[in-house]
């Protein structure tokens, strides 16, 4: 009421627990058996280019995309394909998986060379060929994001270095180590997409990363294709959520069911944009990922550089193992990550953290009656009424879900976090979103 | 390896229903201590009786209705203390137990238990008692030594609102006057209010608008606003009963409407109705309005697009 509505900061303060802050990336290799999924959350996925018994090399393309929304899959090791099978992924989706037995030699594929890029089309093709998806967590294909629909003019590139999730420090470390690559990537994107302005948003709990980014921006000032500014954000979860970040940095509001392109913005994670610079320089596809490994059950926590497809079980063992029995493993941050059901699941392109919790931290609180305290709606960054959505979803009332704008929920989990009655609000809102989607499908028929 | 699987978020804030209710109980303790000095042991005993009765009725209700036992969440304790606080100290014990029965069994559990009741249980308990046993519920007293007669017995006297002559504001503020167990000391209630604000249990919108509007209303009509703030159950009602989560709005806008409405009604009842008190009726009426206020004052989601079929 007394503030500018758009830039008012709303959210929660979970305990930061960033004990891995400042730890350099340790490269971990020597996995004998890797599993590479042929599709991710977005898009129809890939068809396998290899079959059982084939030899593959590092960086070799092993999956051919089935549609515009998919990106190719690449092998992260050299070795032999032992199996091509369908299995359940950590996200719960069923996907084709290619299982590769490593030969330990890490022979590089000969076809890897810097791509020839001279215009927007070849730039986007190079990004797509490298298999790049959003590395922040949503795995949205980058070439689709950078190619806004006809008629939408992008005037601002937002770089997401907020890393608002507790515990994760991979982006922080990446900005410290590779600030120059981030700026190089920004320059490439701004050049080929003709974007005049770039804003880098970083939370104030990462002063070293802010300093490093500012230094990198200043150092190459004369070569910039766009006006780049580094903006310090207040530490508050979920500042790094796409719609929220756009609101804080540009004062623009992305409409419900809309995309950032609707308000002239493209958002890229710092990791994604740094990787774009690498692709253009080397042509190396996305086969490795910077991951924070932490949690109350780990003997040692830290930041690691892991090959995509490495099984979580082996990773945990290689980085020091667990000190107490494991109760839960979360892929991603504690607020939005996915808890997995099997330690054989592989590291994916959008995995930014592995949290291994002990049995005490893994207990799921019991739900009790809602006491209408209003904390959920007070802390909702989208200013929804989570209790209403929750009740509508429990009653499977699609009309009400629509009226209460269920699709505007970003599933950040603030409501569930603050609930004194420990109600499973986001969980039910997700169910509500699915009900909405089903109803829409039925209508379309 | 056995792994727990659950939907995110995987961390939760330490806040629980039990902690919130516990904070309310702590905030009520100063008023209870003052009541001992003003009314003697009977006030404390009556409070203990209503608390015990409330908890037992809650346990029995949940047993009979085959619901999960939640007496540990302390909400019945809060109801018990609040009910006792709006009873006169000399009330017969069985009447207090009957009040607890109405509050917990009829108002709370027959409507669905914690969070589902449409009105504040303690308020309705008090109103039922006031209507059923008008004589006993208006038999106020104060320990004789506060009246300067040296004796320790409870002496029947009128409340400041019923007999507004010769009152001293300092006496009203500290609690040296007749009234119900919890309402007499404005100081003790304000200490509790400060504690609730400090702990973030409630925010100040409802109490401030409620008290402010009542004072403004009686002042405009030529009565003494300070007497009306300190003299009756207004502070107890505004701080502890109108702010009950279940029966008050969740949004700031809603809270302001609720406070203003309750303030106007209290002023009306106090100046124009037969009884000198009006707080409980005002809060009850606003409790009933609450679902409508909630609907009028829903948050507008940021970037929401209305669905067009």
Image: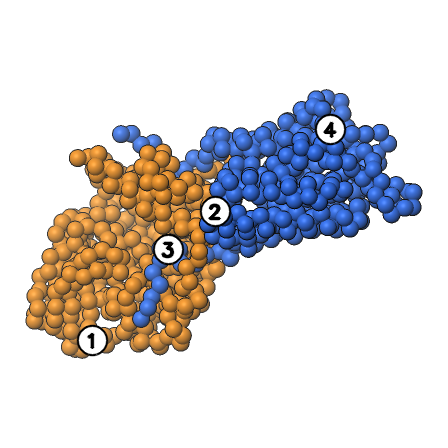
Chain colours: A orange, B blue
The quadrant of the picture occupied by the C terminus of chain A is top left
What residue is disc 1 on?
Answer: A32
Instruction: Please tell me which residue is depicted at 39% across the width and 41% down the height of the picture.
Output: A391
Q: Can residue B231 be seen in this view?
A: no
Q: Are marks 3 and 4 in contact (CB under 8 Å)?
A: no
Question: Which quadrant of the structure image shows residue A148?
Answer: top left
Q: Nearer the viewer, residue A92 or A294?
A: A92
Residue at disc 2, secondary structure: loop
Q: Earlier in the sequence, mark 3 or mark 4?
A: 3
Q: Which chain carries label 1?
A: A
**Residues at marks 4 and 2 touching, judged by CB atoms closer than 8 Å:** no
Depth check, front residue: A404 or A69 = A404
Residue A96 position within the rendered picture, expressed as x and y whole percent measured from the top left: 15, 60
Q: Where residue B244 appears, x then y in whole percent?
A: 58, 41
The residue mark sitting in front, 2 or 1, is 2
Q: Distance between the residues labelled 1 and 4?
A: 84 Å
Callout in the foreground (1, 4) = 4
Q: In this view, does A179 lie above or below B29?
A: below
């Amino acid at each position: 009421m007394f503030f500018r509505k758009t830039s008012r900061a709303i959210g929660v303060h979970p305990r930061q627990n960033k004990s891995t802050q400042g730890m350099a990336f340790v490269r971990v290799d020597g996995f004998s058996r890797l599993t590479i999924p042929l599709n991710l959350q977005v898009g129809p996925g890939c068809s396998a280019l290899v079959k059982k018994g084939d030899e593959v090399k590092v960086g070799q393309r092993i999956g051919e995309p089935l549609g515009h929304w998919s990106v190719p899959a690449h092998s992260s090791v050299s070795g032999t394909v032992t199996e091509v099978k369908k299995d359940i992924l950590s996200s719960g989706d069923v996907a084709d998986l290619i299982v590769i037995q490593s030969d330990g030699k890490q022979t590089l594929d000969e076809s890897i060379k810097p791509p020839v890029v001279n215009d927007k089309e070849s730039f986007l093709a190079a990004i797509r060929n490298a298999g790049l998806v959003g590395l922040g967590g949503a795995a949205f294909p980058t070439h689709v994001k950078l190619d806004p629909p006809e008629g939408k003019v992008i005037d601002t590139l937002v770089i997401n270095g907020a890393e608002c999730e507790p515990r994760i420090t991979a982006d922080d470390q990446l900005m410290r180590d590779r600030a120059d690559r981030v700026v190089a990537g920004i320059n490439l994107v701004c050049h080929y997409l003709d974007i005049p302005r770039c804003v880098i948003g970083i939370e104030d709990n990462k002063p070293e990363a802010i300093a490093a980014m500012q230094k990198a921006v200043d150092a190459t000032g004369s070569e910039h294709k766009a006006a780049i500014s580094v903006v310090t954000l207040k530490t508050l979860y979920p500042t790094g959520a796409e719609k929220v970040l756009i609101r804080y940095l540009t004062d623009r509001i992305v409409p419900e069911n809309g995309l950032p392109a609707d308000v002239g913005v493209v958002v890229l994670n710092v990791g994604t944009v740094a990787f774009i610079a690498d692709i253009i320089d080397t042509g190396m596809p996305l086969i490795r990922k910077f991951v924070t490994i932490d949690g109350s059950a780990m003997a040692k926590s830290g930041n690691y550089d892991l090959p995509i497809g490495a099984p979580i079980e082996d990773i945990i063992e290689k980085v020091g193992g667990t000190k107490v029995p494991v109760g839960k493993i979360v892929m991603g941050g504690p607020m939005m990550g996915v808890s997995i059901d099997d330690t054989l699941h592989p590291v994916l392109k959008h995995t930014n953290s592995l949290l291994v919790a002990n049995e005490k931290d893994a207990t799921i609180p019991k739900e009790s009656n809602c006491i209408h305290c209003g904390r959920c709606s007070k802390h909702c960054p989208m200013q929804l009424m989570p209790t209403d959505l929750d009740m509508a979803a429990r009653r499977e009332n699609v009309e009400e879900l629509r009226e209460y704008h269920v699709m505007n929920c970003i599933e950040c989990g603030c409501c569930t976090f603050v609930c004194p009655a420990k109600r499973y609000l986001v969980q039910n809102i997700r169910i509500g979103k699915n009900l909405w989607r089903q109803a829409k499908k039925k209508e379309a028929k | 390896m056995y792994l727990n699987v659950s939907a995110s978020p995987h961390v939760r804030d330490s806040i629980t229903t039990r902690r919130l209710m516990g904070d309310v109980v702590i905030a009520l303790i100063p008023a209870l201590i003052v009541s001992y000095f003003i009314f003697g042991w009977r006030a404390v005993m009556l409070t203990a009786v209503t608390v015990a009765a409330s908890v037992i009725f809650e346990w029995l209700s949940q047993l009979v209705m085959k619901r999960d036992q939640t007496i540990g969440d302390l909400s019945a304790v809060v109801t018990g203390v609040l009910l006792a606080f709006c009873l006169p100290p000399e009330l017969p014990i069985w009447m207090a137990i009957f009040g607890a029965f109405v509050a917990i069994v009829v108002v709370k559990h027959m409507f669905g238990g914690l969070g589902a009741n449409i009105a504040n249980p303690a308020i309705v308990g008090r109103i039922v008692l006031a209507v059923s046993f008008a004589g006993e519920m208006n038999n106020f007293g104060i320990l004789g030594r506060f009246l300067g007669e040296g004796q320790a017995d409870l002496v029947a006297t009128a409340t400041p609102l019923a007999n507004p002559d010769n009152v001293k504001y300092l006496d009203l503020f500290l609690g040296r006057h007749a009234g119900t167990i919890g309402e007499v000391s404005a100081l003790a209630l304000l200490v509790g209010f400060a504690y609730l604000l400090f702990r973030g249990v409630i925010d100040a919108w409802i109490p401030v608008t409620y008290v402010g509007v009542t004072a403004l209303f009686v002042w405009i009509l030529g009565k003494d606003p300070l007497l009306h703030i300190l003299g009756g159950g207004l502070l107890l009602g505004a701080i502890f009963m109108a702010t009950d989560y279940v029966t008050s709005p969740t949004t700031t806008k809603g809270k302001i409407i609720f406070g203003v409405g309750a303030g106007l009604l209290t002023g009306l009842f106090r100046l124009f109705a037969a009884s000198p008190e009006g707080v409980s009726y005002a809060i009850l009426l606003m409790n009933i309005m609450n679902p409508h206020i909630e609907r009028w004052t829903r948050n507008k989601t940021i970037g929401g697009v209305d669905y067009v079929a």
